Amino acid sequence: MSTLPFPSNTEAVFKAWALERAAHPKGALSPRSLASYHSLWAGWTEHLLGHGPLPWHEARSADVRAYLEALSPRGQARGMLHVSTVTQRRYYRVLKSIYAFALAQGWVEANPVDASASVSASEQMDSLVFHAIDWDALLDAVAPPIDPPPPDQPWLDVRDQAILRLMMQSALTVAELAGLDIGDVRHPRLGSSQGVGELFPAEADAPGVAAAPVMLELSGARKAQERRITLPGDVGAAVLAWLTARDTLALPQDAATPLFVSRKKAGRLTPRALFHLANRHVSTVLGPRYPDTVLAHAGPMTLRNSCIVRWLDAGVPEDEILARAGLREPQALLRLRKHVHAADPAAGAA
């Protein structure tokens, strides 16, 4: 293979690699694969622009690994907050192939997509649990719910506080949060059993109503996900505070409308928006303690896993944890048990 002149830009790198692949009978890419790999390469080079910027030919294995760890889902990936290990491996293979081609051309000194750049499934999952000290800091940073919310409190803050508490203290998944409707909330302050009509103000509560727990009706693709959960006191209070704030917005209030709406009030929050909400909270609270790459993929699943570990810490019976979290088999808890510290003084904080 004859060497080519050094490419003028990253687009030329990809085109040269694709042409080289097309020259081999078994190496040509379908139009669909070509578009997918081009998007992958563009995402990588865009990542490099935001880190330095770092020239593509100067990237090292640590840069590749950081990128793979920070990948988040694109589009409406229901229930996902970090790409699967299958997707990570695909990115790894494509980047490795492009850099191998660049190495053969003499454009790079070494292929940065090596064994050190690979992220294994076990490493990814191990990174998705916070220890109790960090967990306390994350919880303490969520403001206590006030119902009705203060007039000067932005409605987005009230919304985000309710969402974070549902992630951190009730272990809801992204799909569950995105799919919640007003009618899924059960409380005497709601004007009907389906959440239709008036939301009675907190100060007008009848005796006993204020003490009634808030409940959620949850559903999902699996039978175990179809459940009714009782929210802890401050979580329920945060949801009611959000309903009070939501009631002041120019939005439909019937049972079939989304409980949580986007910043532009245009509809449901997307999984990507929920990931960024959680990651922003984690990064704000814990950012001074860790490098950016450690927290880059910390999101709703990190908070859910950490909540479940806190339940295990507190000695909550396994059957109850499975029911709360919408899990069917005890095996689902196996990888989390190694994070349990039953004697931890912070046990039960979640």
Image (cartoon, rainbow, N blue to C red):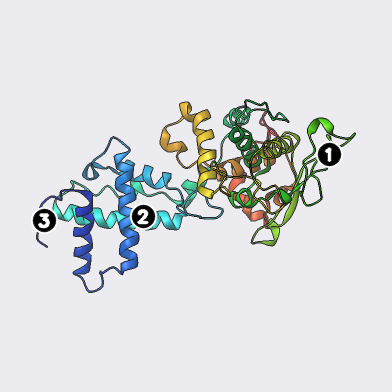
Furthest-front residue in this view: 250
State the separation of the CA atoms marked 2 and 1.
50 Å
Query: Toward the viewer: 189 or 41?
Result: 189
Sequence-wise, the earlier of marks 3 and 1 is 3
Residue placed under numbered mark 3 in the picture: 4
Residue 187: horizontal and vertical position, in percent? Answer: 80, 43
**What kind of residue is marked 3?**
Leu
At a point 60% along the width and 37% down the height, the residue shown is 160
Find residue 311 and report its image quarter. top right
Q: Secondary structure at mark 1?
A: loop
State the separation of the CA atoms marked 3 and 1.
73 Å
**What kind of residue is marked 1?**
Ala
**What kind of residue is marked 2?**
Tyr
Q: Secondary structure at mark 3?
A: loop
Furthest-right residue in this view: 207
At a point 50% along the width and 35% down the height, the residue shown is 280
Which mark lies nearer to you, 3 or 1?
A: 1
Residue 178: horizontal and vertical position, in percent? Answer: 60, 50
Q: Is residue 144 above or below residue 74?
A: above
Residue placed under numbered mark 1 in the picture: 212
Sequence-wise, the earlier of marks 2 and 3 is 3
State the separation of the CA atoms marked 2 and 3.
25 Å
Query: Toward the viewer: 152 or 209?
Result: 152
- The quarter of the rendered structure image containing the N terminus is bottom left
Sequence-wise, the earlier of marks 2 and 1 is 2
Residue placed under numbered mark 2 in the picture: 91
Q: Is residue 285 above or below residue 160?
A: above
